[in-house]
Amino acid sequence: MTVKRDLHYNRKEFETSAYLAYGMGEEKMLMREGQFRNPSGCAISGIIDRSGKRMSGQLMIDSIAVMHDRSNGLGGGFAGYGIYPHYKDFYAFHLFYDRESARSETEAFLGRHFEIAYSSQIQTRKIPAITDEPLIYRYFVSPLPRKLADSHLDEREYVARCANRVNVQINGAYVFSCGKNMGIFKGVGFPEDIGRYYRLEEYEGYAWTCHGRYPTNTPGWWGGAHPFGLLDYSIVHNGEISSYDANRRYIEMFGYKCTLQTDTEVITYIIDYLVRKRGLTLQETAHVIAASFWSTIQDKEETAREQETLLRRMFPSLLVTGPFSIILGYTGGLMSLGDRLKLRSMVCAEKGDVAYMASEESAIRAIQPNPDKVFSPAGGEPVIYELYDKESVQ
């Protein structure tokens, strides 16, 4: 896998984490006293108010903090939807830079392809737990009409390709968020510290997701933290994708590039490809990613059997295998999905207009002690919550 940069990738820190205890003999374990491998980490959580009412990012900080022991300090992040109402018609590009020269080169590129309505450093607060941070900037942009017309692409494809070009071609620059009226905030640290670092209590959104990372096979670095995003899609993921290489080889045939040293990135591209490019519904996409076993499909009623058989035959290389649970964020909604064997936990809950999903029920009860309904979805069963009026946020 081609890797363009290593934004503050600390190999020594990674190697002394519990990573080396994973899948190796005792003689090679380098775990320090007090360290342990958490076989069910990471932590994920999400919330959406289906009425469209906006909520402070502090709620997600409080939720993820309860699951502190599912993380090891090598990654945390948040995605908020509806957080930029004054710039909702512009794509919000969030970028990491290793150095000023990368910023200058990227801003020149953006200036050639977009109208830049506003740009600034993303405001953060210094806290002792977050160190070695890159330069972090934000740009609200709209494609230049002439450039868009000359490209013969629709607007969203044009934006996605421009973000990909920055990530692949400009050393020291990484677009980690590029959707409308949403934004991703992530880095190396425990998630509650990342939330305070980005001052998320000052943001309000109708939906939030968050992630606490416990990397086992891939490094802890700023670009590799979750969520992963493309346009308005964002993914937080707990698990391990054993089918990563097959998934990657297939999806890269359609112009995507997996450069971020983690298996989760490919899920974001799979969903973008299936929903935006192929026009599948979220339910159909779930039947591709977490497809039922053939024996299970044969026992279903005729319509479901025919649909799932068709999807399995059309997209065999996009079946994601291994233990996983994910939360997908998108404009107007959230979806949770677990692997078909339910090897990673997922709990959902509701209270009036507000819906919750998390790795643990405790993370939900930390912010809603008395939900009306609590349930655990079956393996491979998508749970989708959307705004009652999605047009209100578009």
Image (cartoon, grey):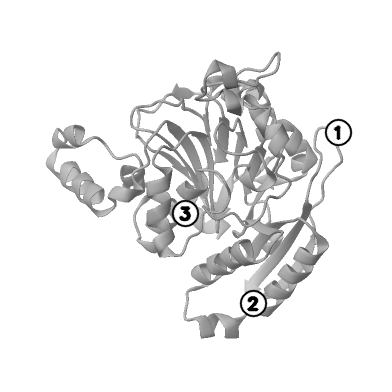
Element assignment for label 2: helix
In the rendered view, does 292 fall on the left or right side of 28? left
Q: Earlier in the sequence, mark 3 or mark 1?
A: 1
Distance CA(mark 3)–CA(mark 1): 34 Å
Task: Say which mark, if any, is on residue 213.
Answer: none
Q: Position of residue 114 (x, y in %)?
A: 66, 75
> Which amino acid does the dot numbered 2 rest on?
His
| Snapshot quadrant of residue 18 | top right
Q: Residues within 10 Å of mark 1 (few under 14, many from 20)?
A: few
Q: Which residue is mark 3?
A: 269
Which residue is located at x 47 percent, y 54 percent?
269
Distance CA(mark 1)–CA(mark 2): 38 Å
Q: Which residue is mark 1?
A: 128
Element assignment for label 1: loop
> Which amino acid does the dot numbered 1 rest on?
Pro
Q: Position of residue 38 (x, y in %)?
A: 57, 21
Which residue is located at x 61 percent, y 35 percent?
211
Task: Say which mark, if any, is on residue 113.
Answer: 2
Q: Residues within 10 Å of mark 3 (few under 14, many from 20)?
A: many
Element assignment for label 3: helix
